[in-house]
């Protein structure tokens, strides 16, 4: 009984090792998948680089009225925006290139570990399928029609709420609210 148990255990271990082993074919499939996913990897990297700048700009915007004399606020705000722009011009390309560089050893290693060669072929088949490519190309158009419809359908309810919020904020800051002639930029 012990020999049978040990044989079964050894067989299971061998199967696990065989499944976890990488092959040149798997590496090639993973490389193709990563190439297709490169834009998404670069988008994640851009977000990583932008996130601290956005947070710092938000805090600076909040601190500006308390820390800078009114006559200098506009100039200081412009200087801060220029500093943030310089940071982004340097940080975004660097972080993006690092993300693309490490993707094979991070995402690729995970794909290699979790997927068999047959499964990677299926994933690649999906990513390269004409129907999926057509669907992906429609992404911006789908987003545009959705945003247009949601904005149109919610404008009557949301615009008064935005004006109320703007008025409330202005009142708390002791300034007059902006005229309602200009719609907020985020409402398109």
Image (cartoon, grey):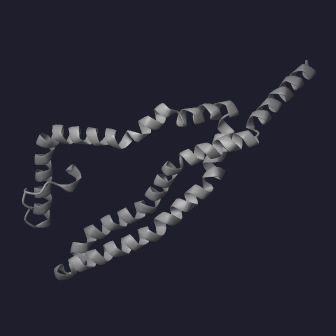
Q: Is residue 108 left or right of residue 156?
A: right
Residue 153 location in percent, x, y? Answer: 17, 37
- Residue drawn where x is 41% and y is 63% of the image: 52
Q: Quadrant of residue 86?
A: bottom left
Q: Residue placed farthest to the top in the image?
A: 1
Q: Is residue 17 left or right of residue 57?
A: right
- Which sits in the foreground, 92 or 131? 131
Give the answer, above or below, for where 17 lies relative to 47. Answer: above
Q: Quadrant of residue 139?
A: top left
Give the answer, above or below, for where 173 lies relative to 18. Answer: below
- Which sits in the foreground, 66 or 90? 90
Residue 75 location in percent, x, y? Answer: 24, 79
Residue 70 location in percent, x, y? Answer: 17, 79
Give the answer, above or below, for where 76 lies relative to 97. Answer: below
- Residue drawn where x is 21% and y is 55% of the image: 185
Residue 127 location in percent, x, y? Answer: 53, 37
Q: Residue placed farthest to the right in the image?
A: 3
- Which sits in the foreground, 54 or 115? 115
Q: Is residue 101 left or right of residue 179?
A: right
- Which sits in the foreground, 128 or 115? 128
How many numbered marks appear?
Answer: 0
- Residue drawn where x is 91% and y is 17% of the image: 1
């Amino acid at each position: 009984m012990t020999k049978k148990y040990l044989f079964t255990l050894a067989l299971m271990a061998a199967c696990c090792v065989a499944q976890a082993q990488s092959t040149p074919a798997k590496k090639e499939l993973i490389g193709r998948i990563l190439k297709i996913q490169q834009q998404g990897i670069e988008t994640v990297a851009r977000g990583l680089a932008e996130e601290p700048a956005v947070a710092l700009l938000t805090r600076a915007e909040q601190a500006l009225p308390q820390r800078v004399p009114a006559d200098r606020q506009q100039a200081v705000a412009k200087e801060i925006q220029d500093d943030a722009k310089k940071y982004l011009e340097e940080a975004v390309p660097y972080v993006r290139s690092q993300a693309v560089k490490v993707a094979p050893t991070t995402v690729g290693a995970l794909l290699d570990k979790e997927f068999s060669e047959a499964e990677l072929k299926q994933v690649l088949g999906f990513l390269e399928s004409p129907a999926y490519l057509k669907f992906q190309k429609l992404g911006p158009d789908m987003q545009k029609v959705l945003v247009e419809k949601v904005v149109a359908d919610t404008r009557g309810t949301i615009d008064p709420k935005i004006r109320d919020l703007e008025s409330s904020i202005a009142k708390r800051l002791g300034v007059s609210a902006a005229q309602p002639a200009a719609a907020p930029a985020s409402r398109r």
